[in-house]
Amino acid sequence: MRYTFVSAALVFATLSLCQSAWSQPADYPSRSWHDRQGQLVGEAVFVGYDYDSQLVQLRAGDDQLIEISVKRLAPKDRRYLLKVLREINPQPLPPRRTAKRKTSKLQSGGSADVVDHATSPGRAARGKMLYGIRWQASVDQALLAGRGSETSDDDRPVMWFRVLGDLEGFM
Amino acid sequence: MRTVSFSEPQVQDLLNNQFVCAFTNTQGDPTAGGSIGHRPKDPAGDCVRGNGKQNVQTLFLTPAGEIFHVATGFLSERDLLAEIQFAGELFQSMRQSNAAPRSLVADAHRQRLAQLGFSQQEIDSENEFEAFLTMPGFTATAGGPQGFQFSQNPFQGFVRARVLADNQFSIRHPLWNWEALERDPTLLVGSGTSFFASSSSADGRDR
């Protein structure tokens, strides 16, 4: 119960301090969006991206809102998305603010949602702590977090662990 | 690996501070192997480096999504640490060098294999099985296909062949795009199937 409360407080504090869940730009031009198979999704304007659900929000010409998973987008569109997100948030996010809590559970195989930010080198790196390692939700998200800001040389490589099974459960 | 290899403090320190980490569950992928379900709290069983290459792969990517180093199969905490350190140093070299990145990655892996004691012939070998047979620890004797004998450590040849194949991958496919691997991992893990079970497997869930 106490743990749940601390987690909830941490989520609220982090979101309040740092950014809204949806990263929204001002205006972006209409462009063609394609899926991974190269099929046209539609002509639409980028509206926002939700880091938690990894959904990209687009607005088609008839004002219809479209949501599509970043995983379904063609590589070219993902690169465009990365560029846009870096324009929206070019500065490193504020340093980590964490509630004090026990870490022994994490290192002994337990898990906890972590919604804070990496301290160094300063990029947004929300993720989940498992086995003492902070994991991003997807490779795309890890690549995004690994990219340094335009003004500094803080790129980080990605360690991608492909494994048969659920890291938190049976494998 | 998750409960043993990642528990090494130096591994945690390096991964959390110098890398960004992601994992993918390959269940359902036709190239993924099979396994008896292991719970996080199951005691870790004995495992040889490289065991279960289709069940687990550790890959290192540039932030642009280019694969610059791989290690397939099980890695002990010591082996994992060595792979992370090599990857970290190679990434720094790529950032600092003016050399063509693909050549730099391929050359770094050639040098690494040479430092690990592999001959030029082994490094250039095309066939993993052929390389396996020339490894120390594996002695071919007369008597047909079943006439192979282990000498000394029976796993030495297997481990060396796995290390060789992993590094050869980066020599032959430097900076391969991660999405290409996700679409078709056979270039890395082959098209066979393997099954993994440790002595601690208790629940009997097959995958």
Image: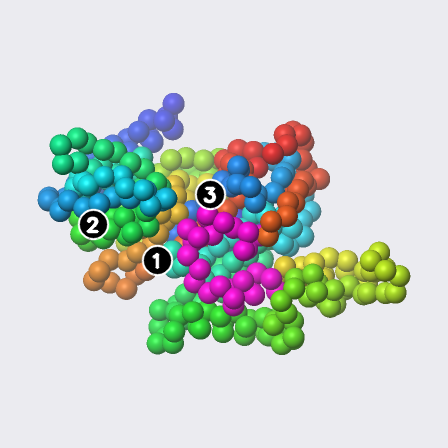
The answer to whether mark 2 and mark 1 are in CB contact below 8 A is no
Residue B49, percent across and down?
Answer: 64, 54
Mark 2 neighbour class, 10 Å CA radius: few under 14, some 14 to 19, many 20 or more: some
Residue A137, percent across and down?
Answer: 38, 41
**Residue denoted by label 3:** B24
Residue B130, percent across and down?
Answer: 70, 65
Q: In the image shown, does A30 or A48 lie closer to the viewer?
A: A30
Kind of residue at badge 2:
Val
What whole-number distance in Å separates the C-alpha atoms at marks 1 and 3?
A: 18 Å
Q: Is residue A171 above or below residue A87?
A: above
Q: Is residue A41 above or below residue A88?
A: above
Q: Is residue A105 in view?
A: no
Q: Is residue B64 above or below residue B206?
A: below
- Using the image, name the chain to which the residue with label 2 belongs: A
The residue segment tinted magenta is B164-189
Kind of residue at badge 3:
Thr
**Residue denoted by label 2:** A84
* In-image side of B138 versus B129 (left or right): right
The quarter of the rendered structure image containing the N terminus of chain A is top left
Please say whether residue B134 is one of the residues in the magenta stretch. Answer: no
Q: In the image shown, does B168 or B197 lie closer to the viewer?
A: B168
Q: Are marks 1 and 3 on the same chain?
A: yes
Kind of residue at badge 1:
Ala
Give the number of the disc on residue B64. 1
Q: Are marks 2 and 1 on the same chain?
A: no
What whole-number distance in Å separates the C-alpha atoms at marks 3 and 2?
A: 25 Å
Residue B82, percent across and down?
Answer: 54, 61
* In-image side of B132 versus B108 (left or right): right
Quarter where residue B97 is shown? bottom left
Please report whichever mark, 1 or 3, sits nearer to the chain's N-terminal start. Answer: 3
